[in-house]
Amino acid sequence: MFETIDLMLDWTSPLKAEPNYSRATQKAYLGTPPTRPQRLSDVFPFWPRPRGSLAPDLVIPEYRQMPWEIDNVFAAVEIKFPNDWVKDAQMKDYVKLMTPKSGNTRKKIGQERVALLRVPEDCIGVAAKEPKEKKHEQETRLRNRR
């Protein structure tokens, strides 16, 4: 969904879906224009990925008109849905990827740039499903008020 919105906005969206980064060099795989993620397949844009790369689910650039190189990343977000488990090694890889090569607080910056979003637990405004009996009681009460 984010990739389609980015395409509709001529690759100027503030959200980048699964952009690839070189694990070794921390460089982003940029497409044309450079605000577009490089894709290896026309059929399925997210697979295959370049060998040895990391791809957070969502990257939010600091400045959206510039490529999402490590120094222009506000946040790298890993999204987990039910039955998709958070793996410590994966999160550590993302922190290492987002850590600047120099600076006094580089480790802190790397940790602060990585976020985890658990769906639906972290989503605001999502009500838990109520048992059918309770829902039926509420509907009856509403009808009786009218």
Image (spheres, rainbow, N blue to C red):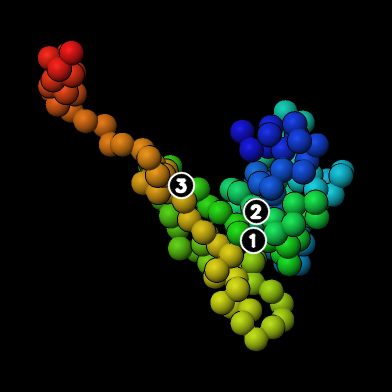
Q: CA distance from mark 2 to mark 3?
A: 17 Å
Task: Indicate the position of residue 101 as horizontal and vertical percent values.
Answer: 71, 77
Mark identifier at residue 93: none
Residue at the spot of label 1: 74
Residue at 83% from the left image edge and 45% from the top image edge: 31
26 to the left or right of 98: right
Residue at the spot of label 2: 60
Which one is closest to the eye, mark 1 or mark 3? 1
Residue at 60% from the left image edge and 73% from the top image edge: 109
Which element type, helix, strand or loop, lies under badge 2?
strand
Residue at 56% from the left image edge and 54% from the top image edge: 77
Residue 109 in sight from this viewpoint: yes
Q: Nearer the viewer, residue 48 or 31?
A: 31
Q: Nearer the viewer, residue 67 or 37?
A: 67
Which mark is first along the chain, 3 or 2? 2
**126 lies above or below 94:** above
Q: CA distance from mark 1 to mark 3?
A: 20 Å
7 to the left or right of 142: right
**66 lies above or below 131:** below
Residue at the spot of label 3: 80
Location of residue 75 (image quadrant): bottom right
Which one is closest to the eye, mark 2 or mark 3? 2
Q: Label 3 amino acid?
A: Lys
